[in-house]
Image: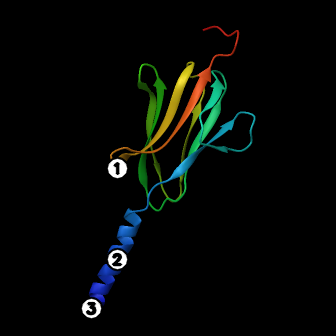
Amino acid sequence: MKKKIFIAAILFLVLFAEACVRLEGGFAIRRYNEETYRKRVTPFECAVAEEVQWAFLFDKVTRRHDIAVIIQKKEIGWVESRSWSDYISREKSAVHGTIKDFEPGEYQIMILQVKENNKVLGTLGFFVYAKAGAES
């Protein structure tokens, strides 16, 4: 009897510990002329025609999680520009995308954990500008 209670307690602690693991990570970007991604915590700028690849890399993933990616543009308030669903797992611990051909303006990328009431896991701001002399 004591052995069963002990095993049940251990099983509960293991399951509880896994449930308490917080998803954490950070952004990295790679510009067209760079070979590797660079960590980024502050907003960055890019031209309308410039292509910037971004990734949100999770520190530790123990199981599958559904993730939402939202790119918002700042107008009077933040307005959704693009969004999609993705997932992470032990085998796939990053979500990524490409910034290219966005209209000039201020934007932010938001990474949300879907099953945790869309808890914000990370945000990264960026500003898209038109090159001087380009038509608007």
Q: Dot 2: few (<14), some (14–19), or many (≥20) neighbours within 10 Å?
A: few
Identify the residue at image location x=65%, y=26%. 46
Is 60 rendered above or below residue 125?
below
Residue 32 left/right relative to 21: right
Residue of label 1: 115
Judged from the image, the secondary structure of the residue bearing numbered disc 3 is helix
Name the kind of residue labelled 1 in the image. Lys
Identify the residue at image location x=57%, y=30%. 126
Q: Dot 3: few (<14), some (14–19), or many (≥20) neighbours within 10 Å?
A: few
x, y (%) of residue 19?
A: 37, 63
Q: Nearer the viewer, residue 113 or 65?
A: 113
Residue 11 left/right relative to 99: left
Q: Considering only order in the chain, which callout, 2 or 3, is on the residue closer to the N terminus?
A: 3
**Residues at discs 3 and 2 in contact (Cβ within 8 Å):** no
Query: In the picture, residue 68 is in which quadrant?
Result: top left
- Looking at the figure, which quarter contains the N terminus? bottom left
Q: Dot 1: few (<14), some (14–19), or many (≥20) neighbours within 10 Å?
A: few
Q: Considering only order in the chain, which callout, 1 or 3, is on the residue closer to the N terminus?
A: 3
Identify the residue at image location x=46%, y=55%. 23
Residue of label 3: 2
Residue of label 2: 11
**Label 2 to label 1: alpha-carbon separation:** 23 Å
